[in-house]
Image (spheres, rainbow, N blue to C red):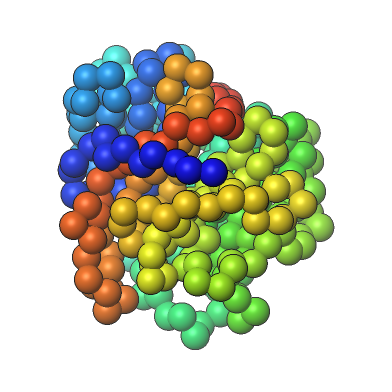
Amino acid sequence: MQFEIRHVLDIKAELGEAPCWSVDQQALYWLDIEGKILHRFDPATGRNESWPAPGTPGCFNFREGGGLVLAASTGFFDFDFATCRFEKICDAPFDPAAFRFNDGKADRQGRLWAGSIKLAFEMEASGQGTFYRYEAGKVVAGISGVKVPNGVAFSPDGTTMYRSDWRPEGKIVMQYDYDIATGTPSNERLFTAMPDGFGIPDGATVDSEGYYWHAAPYSDKGYVARYAPDGRLDLHFEMPVLGPTMVAFGGKDMTTLFITSGRLESHMGLPISPLGGDIFAVETHARGLAETLTARA
């Protein structure tokens, strides 16, 4: 299957992440984690707006009433679309001098899952991060022992949770049984491991048929890959950058896959891609699912 990759936003973000499509606004919200900025991109006009984030942002989800909830190093914040202001909801559940939030996503009930990562990251060290669940202004620890929190996604019916990590056995994606009533994951098991030639399993989403899509940066090439519900690699395509970071469906019919990217190759001894940090779009034959709104605190 051939995919035409469109270069839709030239912005050179240091670490573009967390794309999320607003159905109401027909716009893509996204973060530059290293730049500490919340962005809003309108594909119809090409216009990109931005707002400084309160601390280092990691992930977010849209909320009821017109706004979003942002997980940042200094806490969870409400961002109101009408006033474009951040208001603190609660503190982060860790020392911001030692940790920050990275990847995250809401479940099908609107609970926001956000994973923490240690700032002084050591590949040989055991996982010291945690996935936290935010709901109604409260934060609860959910999955501990996380090294690199990435790849969070939920099946269409919400009963399966996915997340990726680096472990001694390799770069893998796990899945869990997910209790939609309590927001509790259980029965961790291997979903898939990165094929030869792929980099790390990064930001992900699930389409309406339950296929798992993720960005795979920092090998000799950057890829986007899709896996069947049984963990089989179904398709993949090469990106024009080494560091694609996350994927999200959007567009009028939710069939456009938007892909953020970063410019962190120098940390790995690799040359920076000329288009690194930009946003790309691919028309697919799949259809995404709109994110469930998070309840107001």
Left or right: where 98 falls relative to 129: left
> Residue sitting at 69 percent across and 38 percent down?
210
- Residue 99 visible in this rendered orientation of the protein: no
For the residue pair 290 and 95, the one nearer the viewer reads as 290
Q: Residue at x 81, y 57 (%)?
A: 187
Drawn side of residue 251 relative to residue 111, left or right:
left
Q: Which residue is rendered at x = 55% and y = 25% of the image?
A: 290
Position of residue 132 measured from the top left corner of the image (x, y, whole percent) = 57, 51
Q: List x then y, in percent, for residue 99.
A: 40, 64
Locate residue 205: give its quadrant. Answer: top right
* Residue 156, quarter of the rendered image: top right
Quadrant of residue 178 in the image?
top right
**Residue occupying the far bottom of the picture:** 124
Pick the front one: 169 or 101: 169
Left or right: residue 219 versus residue 236 is left
- Residue shown at 46% from the left, 80% from the top: 123
Q: Quadrant of the N terminus?
A: top right
- Provide residue 103's location: percent of width, then percent of height: 47, 51
Q: In the image, residue 89 lies at what x, y percent?
A: 42, 35
